[in-house]
Image: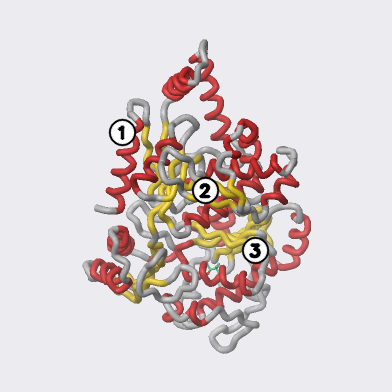
Amino acid sequence: MLIARTISEINSYRPRQQKYIIALVPTMGAIHQGHISLIERARKECDRVIVSIFVNPLQFSPTEDLAEYPRQLETDCELCEKLGVDLVFAPTPEVMGIAGDTSIQPLTTTVIPPVSMTSGLCGKYRPGHFQGVATIVTKLFNIIRPDRAYFGQKDAQQLAIIRRLVSDLNIPVKIVGCPIIRESSGLALSSRNQYLTAEEKEQGVNIYSSLKQAAIAFYQGEKLASKLTGIVKDNLTTVSEIETQYIELVDPKTLEPLENVESTGLLAVAVYLGNTRLIDNIILRQPIVAIDGPAGAGKSTVTRRVAEQLGLLYLDTGAMYRAVTWLVTNSNIDVNDEEKIADLVKGVKIDLIPSESSDLPVEVYVNGQEVTKPIRTPEVTANVSTIAAQSAVREELVTIQQSYGKKGGIIAEGRDIGTNVFPDAELKIFLTASPSERARRRLLDLQNQGYQNIDLGELEREIVERDAKDSTRAIDPLKKAHDAIEIMTDNLTIEAVINKIVQLYQRSFFI
Ligand code: PAF
């Protein structure tokens, strides 16, 4: 792993990486599990991972803890090395061109985000903070020129401002927002947690549980912001040591205050526990249910039926890969010509329209043309796994799937839905069955289709082989999310599995 301290070191490193996808994970050091999750995600999705470690004076006000902010460069670098980081950029304030007393004068050209995005939430209590963040992040983007940059949803206001910044200033970087990482108690991880006593940590658990109480009310139909913030307030006041700074409900993208949550809302709080300021938030939206599991576990039937019972949109990701496969074969492009396919798939428009009955597949449109039937031909079936293994295709489709997910209210099945497509899904299920059971079901299936003399042992061997292939493939392997609930379906009927999922959903959101 390289450690760069100067811009010229970056300038000699960067051009050598021209053909790679470069990730930047900007940090102020004191790397904890939250940062680690960003680095791991970047490692998985990109060829080169750069972590910047810079305690940015521009984002601290004179009364804030700049001097006391934890600095542990050596430990951080060791951790980065273990995580497979390629380069740590650890400049001094001089290198970043902002040495001196930042409280006296602006030391550099300043990036000022729209006032509407900085006047509420933390911005109200930390004047100048987001200008400091926006300025340093712009500088980091210009110095490193990453293809992607990873930020945590924990700092939701920062994330929304940075998304707006790159859009407004046409900075060619994709911003990837990553879910909040919590202790098992629910306390969101933060560098500042190290200032908390054991007792304060226990009291801090109340922050997330208060947000969750409001989320439950939202799932039960409460849309009024004043009611939802009131629930958080009432719950927070049950712990007298917590001093609330703000509780706000805003649009997650524009950060404008909401009176009602029509589709999505960002419910955010800042509190003091002793001298430590803690922030946390939750996105209110209709839930997303992610169902993953090995081939042959009955995912698609179960998902379709659960969607119907719960009134969720069935996001048929398999149909999306079929739609692209149809597009490729229909455009007379060789299914192995990854370059041409990458061009073809860029900006592809895929629409799924729910069918009227769960017995019928969703209607599928690709670039405006209906392809519901043509995507089920043997030609498409034979080629879909080749197309679905291509990274350009997966990337484009995951982006489309995630845009469906923005409003929530969907259920999707696959192999990496809960780990990759919707890592922040409210309910994650891992549906599985033993290889022998899946072989038995496949045998029945084939016999029903009129096939005879099938060797059950051979079927089981094929299934074991496919499992191994699916869980070790380089791109988006089959993986059980750490927070998924496993359902082993060996001794369960389809009805029993469906009931179990419906109950889990109702228990999570409506009781
Ligand atoms: O989130 C942080 O740690 C900082 O605000 C950032 C993005 C590294 C900018 O200094």
Mark closer to the chain start, 1 or 3: 3
Q: Quadrant of ligand 1?
A: bottom right
Label 3: few (<14), some or many (≥20) within 10 Å? some
Q: Is label 3 in contact with label 2 (beta carbons under 8 Å)?
A: no
Q: Residue at x 40, y 62 (%)?
A: 283
Mark closer to the chain start, 2 or 1: 2
Alpha carbon distance from label 2 to label 1? 28 Å
Mark toward the viewer: 1 or 3: 1
Instruction: Name the secondary structure under disc 2.
Output: helix
Total marks placed: 3
Q: Is mark 2 within 8 Å of ligand 1?
A: no
Alpha carbon distance from label 1 to label 3? 46 Å
Q: Amino acid at mark 1?
A: Ala
Q: Amino acid at mark 3?
A: Val
The image quarter in which residue 485 lies: top left
Instruction: Name the secondary structure under disc 3.
Output: loop
Position of residue 271 relative to residue 460, above or below, is: below
Instruction: Name the secondary structure under disc 1.
Output: helix
Q: Depth check: 126 or 192 in front?
A: 126
Find disc 2 in the rendering and name its residue.
420
Q: Depth check: 387 or 19 in front?
A: 387
Find disc 1 in the rendering and name its residue.
496
The answer, for residue 237, to whether it is visible in the render is yes
Label 2: few (<14), some or many (≥20) within 10 Å? some
Find disc 3 in the rendering and name its residue.
173
Position of residue 120 relative to residue 6, above or below, is: below
Mark toward the viewer: 2 or 1: 1
